[in-house]
Amino acid sequence: MCGIVAVTGYKKALPLLINGLEKLEYRGYDSAGIAVISSETKNIVCNKAEGKLNNLKNNLKNAEIPGTVGIGHTRWATHGKPEVKNAHPHLDSLGKVAVVQNGIIENYQELKSKLEKEGISFDSDTDTEVIPHLIQKELIALSQLNLENNGSTLLVAVRNVISDLEGSYALAVIWSGAPDSLVVARRQAPLIIGLGEGEFICASDTPAIASFTKIILPLEDGEIALLTPLGIEIYDSNNERQYRNPISLQIAEQVIDKNNFRHYMLKEIYDQPEIAKYWLEKYLIKDLKTSKFQIKYPFDTKFFESIERIEIVACGTSKHAAMVGKFLLEQFSGIPTNVFFASEFRYSPPPLLPNTLTIGVTQSGETADTIAAIKMEIQRRASMGDESYKPNLVAITNRIESSIGRQISNIIDIGAGIEIGVAATKTFFAQLLSFYGLAIKFAQIKQSQSNETISQLISELTKLPPLVEELLEKHNQSSEKLAHEFFNIKDVIFLGRGINYPIALEGALKLKEISYIHAAGYPAGEMKHGPIALLDKKVPVISIAFPGEVFDKVISNAQEAKARDAYLIGVAPKCKGTEIFDYLMAIPSTNEWISPLLAIVPLQLLSYHIAAHRGLDVDQPRNLAKSVTVE
Ligand code: M6R
């Protein structure tokens, strides 16, 4: 989704901005732009391009823009098509104020109409363009008070303008009247200030900062800041000056390297055995006295003992991981658990019940709906004033430095390393592992399973790294071949039951988001209640069938599809019953509890190869963003 980079300091701004924007490319965008205050003319020089960052770089190939203050942006279209006129930065009509913005200004129509009545004409269809016009208007009003042209004046102007904005945003503003100053502000959208040597860099996401500095000051919700080469002034929404110490960025320098893989997505699918090893080493600790394994979290889990139910909020792939989590927490640990789309939960939450654990699952830690749902839940629980209703929170994230990491202190770091492919693969796998950890922990607390059953699950998990390696070896080439046969299909149905129903949903999501082929996942038993009408020989059906309670049922559901001429692909161990499949993507036969961790791998590979074979932009599929920071 949109990305912001902004700098002020002593070094040339343009290379810093381009470098920062390169680090934000993975988030997904459809145009890009920069604006720099020229140190020679003191005018704003702006350049924008539709499409990839390379187009912007080509525009700027021979450009020498002397200037140390600038803003840059990658835009993911919300209001207005992905065209140059809608790309950021946006300027006021005098060309003196430039603004980049992430978020949505909900009352922009009203503000725009007022400005138009005053004679201001607009160049774009965006919500953002109202901001530079409003700031210029404020600056003109302030000049009548004989305020100096400096950063403090710009700060006042921006503050006055944002008080009229509705919605969520992060923005960065420069003004040719204060050529060393940068003003940034945020409301419900992330913005982080990096303290470099001789410069300040502000960005919407840490990768844009990590190569400059590891010392950061995250801006809190509602804050506004003035940055000049001499320092930073931060103010809260009541205009109180804020003083706090910088913190160090808790991520290793982001290594963004494809390691000879054709796409990041394939590399990330191949990272999964390492992620399993990391999880086992980090979270599974052997108690030296009892020789038993314990799940170890970096926070006190004593409060888990009083938990009677769990609610989980998440979006997209994270929600699918949460659904596997629900199955484990209910069926293995015996705790009633509900999973909600964060976007639904925030407007229609269930009635409050006591002794509830609320879990937010978000890879990026920045998904607007998930962050808002958690915030709302914290507020409504805190307002009950009853100890048993208090918010008990855990976050499962890949980005502990993100907004969710600042909202919730009990963090389960999935430790998957930065994921560049927009389609989540390794982070889904790592989120699943986090739920196995929670299920084991709760099963031990609630004694829902015998020690032997718990030990058996743990022992199966310890075998994961070689099993996943074996799956990758076995299925990479074969799914590439299968993809050749299927790259032209229009619809695919994914079926699963029980613990593997969410894997059917995730398999379908992976296929549609990167290959643009329509795919839908169903609980296998539901097919005959409607989706069966779609079946004919042109619609392949992919069934996940694992020996266990529902194996025979899934096989008979697959049989029903075969009777309608569907081509059947099975994701199952090679065993009696699986002869029915026209093509078997064989997975090892292990304990059914861990089957989702295996079944997802061939499905990821198949989706990847179909999209790659169709010649699509696998890592940055159209219209998608890595982290969805708007509602
Ligand atoms: O960062 P989050 O886990 O909160 O993101 C949630 C979804 O936006 C994300 O999983 C999305 O569905 C991905 N494109 C899935 O591949």
Image (cartoon, rainbow, N blue to C red):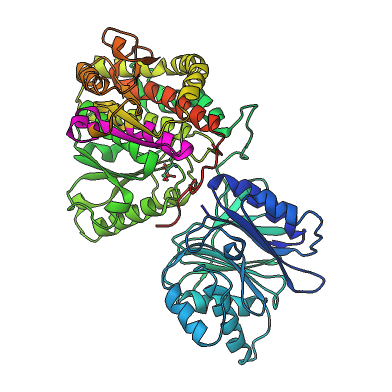
Find residue 338 and report its horizontal and vertical position in percent: 23, 41
Left-right relation of 116 to 106: right
Q: In this view, does 109 lie above or below 335?
A: below
Q: In which quarter of the image is ligand 1?
A: top left
The image quarter containing residue 138 is bottom right
Find residue 98 and report its horizontal and vertical position in percent: 63, 70
Identify which residue is drawn at 46% across, 32% down: 425
Find residue 46 and report its horizontal and vertical position in percent: 70, 66
Main SS class of the magenta portion in the image: helix
Residue 277 in view in this figure: no
Q: Is residue 31 above or below residue 518?
A: below
Q: Which of 182 and 21 is in front in this view?
A: 21
Extent of the magenta region:
505-532
Q: In this view, does 211 lie above or below 471?
A: below
Find residue 152 and report its horizontal and vertical position in percent: 62, 77
Q: Nearer the viewer, residue 399 or 238?
A: 399
